[in-house]
Every structure is written in structure tokens, then in C-alpha cells.
Amino acid sequence: MLGLAPDAPSAKAAGGVAKPGKWAGTGCDDEAVWGECQGSGKSAYRTCADLTEPAFRCSCPSRKFPCKHALGLLLLWADGAVDTGPRPGWTAEWMEERRERAGKAAQRKAATAAKTRDPKTVERRERRVEDGLAELDQWLRDQVAHGLAQAEKAPYRMWDDAARRLVDAQAGSLAGQVRGLAAIPRQPGWPDRLLEEYALLRLLMRAYARRDELPEGLRDTVRSRVGFTVPQEEVLAGGERVRDRWWVTGVRDTAQELLTTRRVWLLGRRTRRPALVLSFAAPGTSLDSSLIVGTEIDAELAFYPGTPPLRALVAERHGAVAPGRPAGTSVQGFLDEHAAALARDPWLDRWPATLENVRLARAAGGDLAVVDGAGDALPLRLGDPWRLLALSGGGPVTMAGEWSPRGLGPLAAWHDDEGTVIL
């Protein structure tokens, strides 16, 4: 629960109030937990949390969110020190207000989405994208015809100009891929990698040109990787629904220009199915923090179209969040899963890995790797290894991370004694 703390001082202060003697009128049910904590004044602070999000409310004057009282109450609840009971009026009123606001927001989004699906607008967008891809195709031909050697000393402007033209053509996802090419010539073995990325871009453009001939799932994947988005309302209304108990295995935030993206990886306990939940935040706004690494949620996910279906929305939650340690697989098992996914989506740039009973080791070149009981290894892409080294102490751990062509980027690990550790 301390993973929700806005900073280290808040997490420390929460421990000070997570004591039954400081609380009165505590209670919980399947959706909420509440209580009154005595503060420095005469009146107690009324604190409650919506366990299905989670979301918080406290009458204290703190500007931190969640405050120490909300965190302390959650710690008490997680320790089993809060009994079930009927909601007091002030908690019931707050929960009802939240449900009403959520319903109205969904109605507004649906109305907005209906207005934007004008056939003429869609047709104009398609033409602009086709023109943008034709221009990119010529740009790629020029890069290969002139030789890759020029890329090593090329200014960033070369890539940025090509990306900006794709933005103008409303092919935003493709623009991001082109902009990312600028970093490749600064890496070892860059010519092979750059040529590979050029080939994947060309393959994507060819697939888009022949999209009407593709299977439905692959066609959806191609459109998504070019830049066509599917409104959340359509996903919730018609997307594939899967209910399971989902382990939250890792979170990664990335900042690009004026937007921060949060990737949250989930793994189904019963289905063994991975899922990716994305949230975005502009400057001055906060990211979704309702999915906490090291917890397990009973939820129904709605998956975006594509092959393999990976990105999803949390459509409906059932019951409260609970601590949870994921069950991983072997290195060979993971490689088989990744190979199957890559066969269905050749542009796949990252895939979640949850490995069981792996140890840290040194690869042939001296770099760190993880090795399982069978002796199979994966290279690690880790800037600071000391936290992971201190946690494992040479022993086995369960580890979750993101796999990419550069190796495995660890996100979290589970140890029998230390519990969940964010890496």
C-alpha cells in the first residue's frame, strides 16, 4: 500500500498513524474502508477510501494525496485490523457521488465520440495518412540509396523533420517510431539495427496499403501502429471481455515532449494472459495510480482490437484489492510466449516477462543476466543493479520486467522474506 504514497515522508508518516489506538469508527465492506483518526485539533479527521479504484477522501488540511491518514487506514485494513460493517452516512454519500460523476463522464465521452465519427472526416483522414506514408516511403528509399554511413553524423533534425510530416499527416504513432530512430546511430552495432528498423517501417507501410486483404486482428494492429486510435467507449462497448484475478506485475513511466505515459502490466492468474493498461498525463495533471505493483485485482478487462490482443481497459472491478505475488515461468517458457506473439505482430517492440526462480549471473561479456534452474539465461538491461543484488543476495527471486531487443528491463521482484520490491 505504501506504493501509493506521494513521497517518502508520507510513507513514513503513515506508519505512525497505522495504529488501531489512533482510530475510531473504523469499518469496511467489499468496496470501501473508513474511519476517524484523532488529529492535533479537537475534531477527528474523517477518512475513507474507495477500494475499487483506489480513491481517497480525508477531512484533514494536508495537500498531499493520498495523505498520511488515508495511507495509514489502508495499512490497517491490509493487516486485517479493520472489521466489516455498515457504511456511515458520510462514506455512503461520498461513494454515491463518485458513482454519479463516473456515469455522467461516461455519457459525455459517448456523446463526444458520436460527433467525431463523421464519414467525410474519416475519409479525409485516410487520404492524409496515405499521402504521408507515400512520402515516408520515398524518404526511406533515399536513406538506403545514399547509404547508412551518413546517419552516424546526421543531425537530429533529419529524423524530426520526417516525423513532423507524419504528424501533419495524422499518423502520430508512426511519427514516434521515426523520431526514435535518431538514437540508434549512437549505439554499438547500429547499422544492422537501423536497417532492421527501416525494413520494419517499410513492412508496416506495405501492410497498410494492403490492409483490406489482412485478417481482422492484424488489420487492427496495423492501423493502431500507424496512428488510428479506438475510442475507449468502443472498447468498453464491443471489445473482448476477460474476467480474471489479475496480478499487477510492473509499472513504467516514460516522458516524451509534453506527455508522460504510464504502462501498467497485468497477468491473469487463471488465463495466464498478459495485459497492458496505458494512461497519459499532460504537464500539471496526474497519472492513474489505481493499479499498484504487488497487488491482485478481481476485474473484467476490455481488450483493444489487435493481434495479439494486449492493450486493455479495466472495465469493471469486483471486490477489493488484495496483495498478490505472481506465478512466473521459465526462461524457455517466456521465449516461447514471446516468439508466438512476435509471429502475430512483427512490429512488437516490448513484451512482459514474469520469471520464476531466477538468479543473477554474469554473462560471457561480463554483463548481468538472469538464469533459471535449467541454466537458460536472459540479458538484463539495468542501469543500477545494486537494489536487485541486495534483494536477491544470490538467491532465487520472482522477477517481472519488459523484454525488448536490448534485453530485459526489470520492473519488480518478489522475495520470500522481503516481499515486493519495485526496481
Image (cartoon, helix red, strand yellow):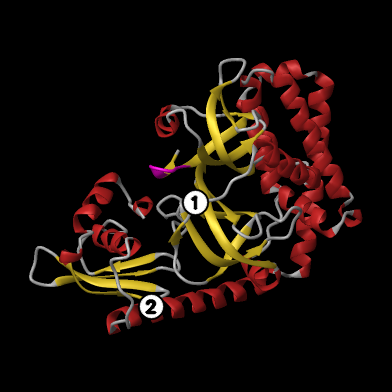
Question: Is 56 colored magenta in this rendering?
Answer: no
Residue 65 lies left or right of residue 191; in this view the side is left
Residue 218, position as x, y percentages in the image: 81, 53
User: In which quadrant will I find the N terminus?
Assistant: bottom left
Q: Residues within 10 Å of mark 2 (few under 14, many from 20)?
A: some
Residue 137 sits above or below residue 210 on the image: above
Q: Judging from the image, what secondary structure is the residue with disc 1 in? A: loop
User: Which quarter of the figure has residue 184?
Assistant: top right
**Which residue is painted at 41% across and 68% down in the image?**
51
Q: Which residue is mark 2?
A: 95
Residue 314, position as x, y percentages in the image: 56, 64
Residue 114 sits above or below residue 269 on the image: below
Residue 51 sits above or below residue 277 on the image: below
Give the magenta part as a residue range: 414-419
Whether residue 164 can be seen here: no
User: Which quarter of the figure has residue 142?
Assistant: top right
Residue 32 lies left or right of residue 195; in this view the side is left
Question: Is 416 colored magenta in this rendering?
Answer: yes
User: Disc number at residue 142?
Assistant: none
**Which residue is painted at 77% across and 31% down in the image?**
198
Nearer the observer, disc 2 or disc 1? 1
CA separation in Å, label 2 and label 1:
29 Å
Instruction: From the viewer's side, name the closer residue of 69 and 400.
Output: 400
Instruction: From the viewer's side, name the closer residue of 59 and 270.
Output: 270
Q: Which residue is mark 1?
A: 325
Whether residue 36 can be seen here: yes
Q: Judging from the image, what secondary structure is the residue with disc 2 in? A: helix
Mark 1 is on which residue type? Arg
